[in-house]
Amino acid sequence: MTEEERQQLEAAVLKNLLQPAEYEIDGERTTDFPMGDRLDRAKPVYEYVEGFKTDISGCKKKSELPKAALDYIKYVEKAIGCPIKYVSVGASRDQYIVM
């Protein structure tokens, strides 16, 4: 990885990740994505998830990931209601972890 690629990676990994959790429409909250004219009135309600400023491109197994990365994976699993089987840690085809 070049120094420029490393800097781009670090810039992409935010200190705090902002995730839309719900939408507020006319004073009511919903987790369903609004459609039609409701979309124009919808305001996203965000949750903050701890980010990480660590290069994970060298990680080969789950135990090598930082705690904040594992917490984020758990957050996404809960949000989508489905376990995550693979996590990409880089751009190369072989840069992934089997969870």
Image (cartoon, grey):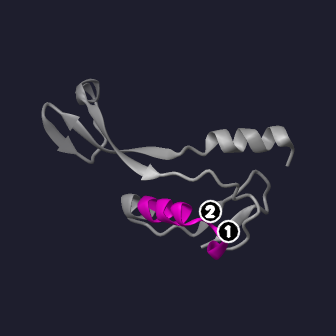
Q: Which residue is mark 1?
A: 97
Instruction: Give whichever of 70, 15 is nearer the camera.
Output: 15
Amino acid type indicated by mark 2: Val
Residue at 82% across / 37% down in the picture? 4
Q: Is residue 46 magenta?
A: no
Residue at 63% across / 76% down in the picture? 63
**Is mark 1 in CB contact (under 8 Å) with mark 2?**
yes
78 lies left or right of 93: left
Q: Position of residue 87 (x, y in %)?
A: 62, 62
Residue 39 placement: quadrant: top left
Residue at 74% across / 40% down in the picture? 7
Q: Position of residue 50 (x, y in %)?
A: 47, 53
Magenta range is 62-76
Q: How many numbered discs sit on the rendered protein?
A: 2
Amino acid type indicated by mark 1: Ile
Residue at 12% across / 34% down in the picture? 27
- The rendered magenta stretch, by its main secondary structure, is classed as helix
Q: Which circle marks residue 40 in the picture?
A: none
Q: Which circle marks residue 87 in the picture?
A: 2
Q: Position of residue 46 (x, y in %)?
A: 34, 42
Q: Earlier in the sequence, mark 1 or mark 2?
A: 2
